[in-house]
Amino acid sequence: MAAYVIRRVLANVLVFLLISVGIFVLVRLAPGDPVRMMVDPEQMRGGGAAFIEAKRHELGLDRPIFVQYGHWLSGALHGDLGYSYVGHRPVGAVLGERVGPTLQLMGAALAVALVVSVALGVAAAVRRNTAVDYGATVLGLAAVSVPPFFLGIVGIYVFSLQLGVLPSAGMTTPGGGGLVDQLRHLVLPGLILAFVTAGPFTRYVRGGLVDELGAEYVRTAEAKGASPARVVLRHALRNSLIPLITVVMYQIPQMLAGAVVIEQVFAWPGMGQLAVSSIGQHDYPVIVGFALYVAVLVLVCNLVADVLYAAVDPRVSLR
Amino acid sequence: MTTITTSPAIKKAPSASPRARALRRFRRNRLAVAGAAVLGAVVLVTLLAPLIAGHPPNTVDLYAIRQGPSGAHWFGTDSSGRDVFARTLYAGRVSLLVGLTAALAAITVGTLLGAVSGLFGGWADHVIMRAADIVMSFPTVVVILVLAGIVGPSMTVLIAAIGLTQWPVAGRVVRGVTLSLRDREYIHAAEAAGANAWWLIRKHIVPAALPPVTVTGTLAVAQAIMLETTASFLGLGVRPPQASWGNMLNEAQNLTLIQTMPWLWIPPGVAIAVTVLAVNFVGDGLRDAVTPAGQGGGR
């Protein structure tokens, strides 16, 4: 097991290095002077051509590209991602304050999605080929077919503008505040992200449970006289949820993509909204910081998924 | 397809070519047929846009701004007096074209890499399949976002990004087909006769992989349309004034417009949902048609 974990970690480090090379090359292709990307704007002010030339030497931009890459990477690993063009603050700090809102949105949506998809998936698997089952299938297809930004606009139109019961933007009412106010702001974006996420989950829960219900131990449990509810909930469901753990881990990065869109619709002050607005403002250091952050998130989720899968199910061969 | 001569006695038996059998199974699936009909209608209407629209999509008419739906402007007009019905139709051309092209790019890359992976095995297989795992785990919208952010948004970047991120599904399918073919006698015969890898891929693997690749390709079209509209909605895809379903929703994105001019955002939003749903129904129907129960399939 330990050898397996170490191998997976090393493989992921290798992948991260490859991605960082890709991002580094892209950054160099990007328009704009790298000196501007790395120097504190306070110092840049008043500096002439000679100052920039000195900085170029100091930053090693006249050195070979491999040396530059090493320098950039070690800086990035130490949290030095340069300075935002727009906010004139370190990228790490700019990104850092956006992580919380995004995690809050994703966490709430994930919780709702899990509860709904397990309930719906169990109902669909137990009542196979009934209206419940078809309903779950259609809902799952709708979740991947109706664009979340359209759902968001419809939600705003109905609940914020026509009925006036829910806020349409932001995390809190300016000047208002309080827990209830925050929750009210979370309802629309959270539910829409949950809907998008619950689609694939429901499919997995249903599929996994259908497979398990056909297994021999289920028949044994039934033969021993266990009630149908007990057979489903205590025997089959527990086993069918094992693959869901990994599916959830793989799905978290995909949720981030959904969050990017939903944050844009609901002016939610998270990382996705920051990334989109940074692109509009050509704020390359922030875009690069966001890209590295996502890369780490994806690789960590993959790693946790692989390890959890192996840890939970002893039948998995550790290759 | 080669025709098989059958004796008159069994001519009536339902043993047509695999393609005909798949088509019959597809026709029995009501959702899939409905999806195909809707999709056909959408394609037809967008192709005939110049005849149907009645107005050019990008012509500004300052005497007719912000009008509700009427006989002259079926879906009303936007803040520049452009006809929303015409824009919705022309936007459909762009969204469908990007969706098709990007999906085609993805399955082409996937087919080649999958075939190489399956034929050669060893480290090539290992590297390609690991790459597929990693690419699949990255959220495509974020990849498009970063690429468009650094290189600049355009339709080319969009198609390239979708092609580069959506190939693994087709890649895995084709690898599986290739592995199942590798030890068949006719492949050994072709190799003994001097066929190289490229010949095997063209003459044997691609034809065998075509049915399952058609399925993944169809589902990839749905995915690609979704990605195009999402990117364009975020302002990172198709650039205005050229209309796409996504950027039409982007332009409608403020509370006043949402409240007072719903005809701006309902048509493109419904168009995306209906089209993507139709393509997904067709894809599911095709999957059930080419992999009948008991013949495996799945992911």
Image (cartoon, coloured by chain):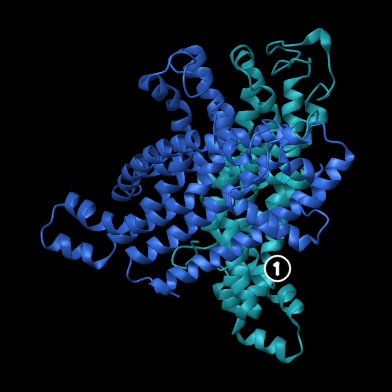
- Which residue is pictured at 78% across the width and 30% down the height? B240
Chain B visual colour: cyan
Residue at the (33%, 41%) spot, across then down: A115
SS for tag 1? helix
User: Residue, x 79% and y 31% (percent of image)?
Assistant: A45
Label 1, residues with CA under 10 Å away: few <14, some 14-19, many ≥20: many
Judged left or right of residue A261, residue A203 is: left
How far across and down, in percent of the image, does residue A268 sit?
53, 28
Q: Position of residue A16 (x, y in %)?
A: 60, 59
Q: Nearer the viewer, residue A198 or B127?
A: B127
Q: Residue furthest left?
A: A225
Chain the render paints blue: A
Residue lying farthest to the bottom in this orientation: B192
Nearer the observer, A9 or B59:
A9
Quadrant of residue A222 within the rendered picture: bottom left
Q: In this view, does B59 lie above or below B275?
A: above
The amino acid type of the residue labelled 1 equals Leu
Q: Position of residue A306 (x, y in %)?
A: 44, 63
Q: Name the residue under label 1.
A: B112
Q: Where is residue A276 in the image (x, y as percent from the top left)?
A: 65, 35
Identify the residue at image location x=50%, y=23%: A155
Report whether B58 appears left or right of B206: right
